[in-house]
Image (cartoon, rainbow, N blue to C red):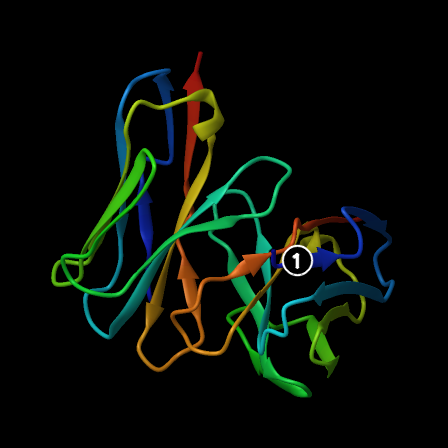
Amino acid sequence: ILNVEQSPQSLHVQEGDSTNFTCSFPSSNFYALHWYRWETAKSPEALFVMTLNGDEKKKGRISATLNTKEGYSYLYIKGSQPEDSATYLCAFVGSGTYKYIFGTGTRLKVLA
Amino acid sequence: DVKVTQSSRYLVKRTGEKVFLECVQDMDHENMFWYRQDPGLGLRLIYFSYDVKMKEKGDIPEGYSVSREKKERFSLILESASTNQTSMYLCASSYTGNNEKLFFGSGTQLSVL
């Protein structure tokens, strides 16, 4: 059974703080790693799809890095704002499969 | 913008009832998925479909079936609802290819009493 783990499970930060979370996944048979943001009462939305070792993606104040050899990805938020409060999910996609294996998510609360 | 629409936001059913959860997408996506979300667990795949009338079991298909008669619509069926099927159900769709991002519906919170 493939295991995708995210840490921490939840996080409270002050407005303006920078923060980061981790997604760990199997290092073998890697095809892609996805990050999604899920705000309360809304649909999860894709942030990044990463496929290459060493990949770095950026969208505004949010960025992500990927290390496929050791099986982890980091998501960084610079200068957190209350609107960043959400659950952040990562999903591992193995080669030759349609299955996206999701982690349990990191719940971020940004305090004003 | 891609739209994935789930028919109900909240649903309350009794044990033993047959339950239909409907999902419609408007972007001509080939792939459609049904997940459930439970506290402390990641999104778990119930079924997915990569074409009309095609379906594949996910990780937790027991107690569920699906129907995809048209490309835009993917239905999840609980043949005889049980209390352990109380959950948040999320539908998603994507273009073909296994590194395509998923577009999600807003979810259906199903309570089985």
Residue in the picture at 53% in, 73% down: B58
Residue at horizontal 69%, vertical 79%?
B71
Vertical placement of residue B108 versus A99, above or below: above
- In the image, taking residue A93 as reference, residue A109 lies left or right, namely right
Which residue lies under the disc numbered 1?
B3
Q: Which quarter of the rendered picture does the C terminus of chain A lie within?
A: top left
Q: Which residue lies furthest to the bottom in this view?
A: B53
Between residue A82 and residue B33, name the one nearer to us: A82
Amino acid identity at mark 1: Lys
Quick check: A75 above or below A81?
below
Q: Nearer the viewer, residue A69 or B72?
A: B72
Total labels: the figure holds 1
One can see residue A1 in this view: no
Q: Quadrant of the N terminus of chain A?
A: bottom left
Corner quadrant of residue B100: bottom left
Name which quarter of the figure residue A14 lies in: top left
Up the image or down, A93 lies above or below B10; here it is below
Q: Position of residue A30 (x, y in %)?
A: 25, 70
Along the line of sight, the residue nearer the viewer: A32 or B110? A32
CA neighbours of label 1 inside 10 A, class few (<14), some (14 to 19), many (20+): some
Q: Note whether residue A67 is visible.
A: yes
Subunit ID for the residue under disc 1: B
Residue B9 image offset from top left, x and y in percent: 76, 46
Horizontal side of residue B1 vs B75, given as left or right: left
Helix, strand or loop under label 1: loop
- The x and y percentages for residue A26 are 24, 64
Residue B15 picture location, percent across and down: 83, 57
